[in-house]
Image (cartoon, grey):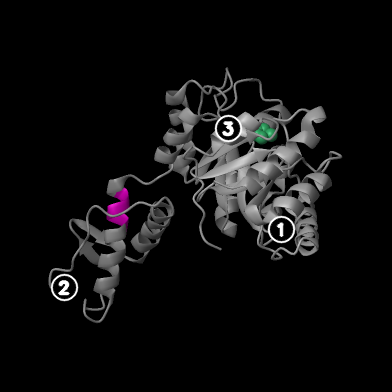
Amino acid sequence: MPLRSRRSCLAVPGSNPRFLEKARGLDADQVFLDLEDAVAPLAKADARRNVVDALTEGGWGDTVRVVRVNDWTTQWTYQDVAEVVGKAGADLDCVMLPKVQSADHVVALDLLLSQVEKASGLEVGRLGIEAQIEDALGLTNIDAIATASPRLESLIFGPADFMASINMKSLVVGEQPPGYDVGDAYHYILMRILMAARSSGRQAIDGPYLQVRDVESFRRVAGRSAALGFDGKWVLHPDQVAAANEVYSPSQGDYDHAENILDAYEYHTSEAGGRKGSVMLGDEMIDEASRKMALVVVAKGRAAGMTRADVWEPHGG
Ligand code: GLV
Ligand code: MG
């Protein structure tokens, strides 16, 4: 499966045709059309129709197109999938499942997707799944969730529901709870999600930051999960899109450096380069582990469409 760039994942309420229209012009890597918590119960049926229209009308370019359905404890999930995938499955890339608590939740969606794909003449297995981890049970079962289906592409932290589920004493999503002054209250959760994602080859995505007018704070909070290794974050407002794209991309310098490590290492380990296992690149010693680190940065940079500004050349070995 190709690595999809998910630095910025834009939430768009399915009940608001104006927002659906506006979302097309934004530079988000992914857009998810929401049928869940941003849509009132009485508006769910209309929202399904809006989402089908928005997908089939097209105009999304390279943006990863996702619909967030309602969770399995509601009465809506099967109709969300049947209607949106049945009518617009060819114009969709992934289905996001919220409040995933166990591997069964993912398996159930996988089976339902296969049925709807068959019934609608779609390629079976093409649609991916994104799983939101939003409570203690989901986090406890995360390794099984991460490997429950080959469709699973990403594990997403849902901070608002998560904070409610563990009784965290704060209402400000993404910020530290008052009284906790000895570190990052989210560190364990983020690391747990990241370990499950990395051990199963999935992406790790950070959730929303609700103070949408405060872009500097968004950058600060996003910078933490980006530093750990997360692939991207939800964005709720146009101003957050550019910030996320920047924070979750490698810097130009790091990207060039990583590409140069790959080239230099490939050359020096080759016959022509002398079959060396550890070599100097400028003042830095590089080896097989450096290559692995460089591959991560290069994969992210290439997925984000970056190009090299500085190209290494072998100077006679
Ligand atoms: C997102 O769904 C959240 O609960 O934060
Ligand atoms: Mg949620």
Magenta residues span 254-258
Tell me the quadrant of ligand 2: top right
Q: Nearer the viewer, mark 3 or mark 2?
A: 3
Q: Bin the neighbour count of mark 2 within 10 Å (Cα to Cα): few under 14, some 14-19, many 20 and up.
A: few
Label 3 element class = loop
- From this view, report whether residue 244 is shown above or below residue 1: above
Q: Is residue 207 visible?
A: no
For label 1, the crowd category at 10 Å Cα-Cα, with few meaning under 14, some 14 to 19 and many 20 or more, is some
122 and 9: which is toward the camera: 122
**Quarter of the rendering occupied by the C terminus:** bottom left
Q: Is residue 53 left or right of residue 118?
A: left
Mark 3: amino acid: Pro
Q: Which residue is mark 3?
A: 208
- The residue sitting at 71% across, 63% down in the picture is 122
Q: Is residue 23 magenta?
A: no
Identify the residue position indicated by label 1 in the image: 148
Pointers 3 and 2 in contact (CB under 8 A)?
no
Sort mark 3 into few (<14), some (14-19) or many (20+) by Cα contacts within 10 Å: many
Distance CA(mark 2)–CA(mark 1) = 47 Å
- In this picture, residue 173 sits left or right of residue 311: right
Q: Nearer the viewer, mark 1 or mark 3?
A: 3
Which kind of residue does numbered mark 2 sit on?
Answer: Gly
Name the secondary structure under disc 1: loop
Quadrant in the picture for the N terminus: bottom right
Residue identifier under label 2: 317
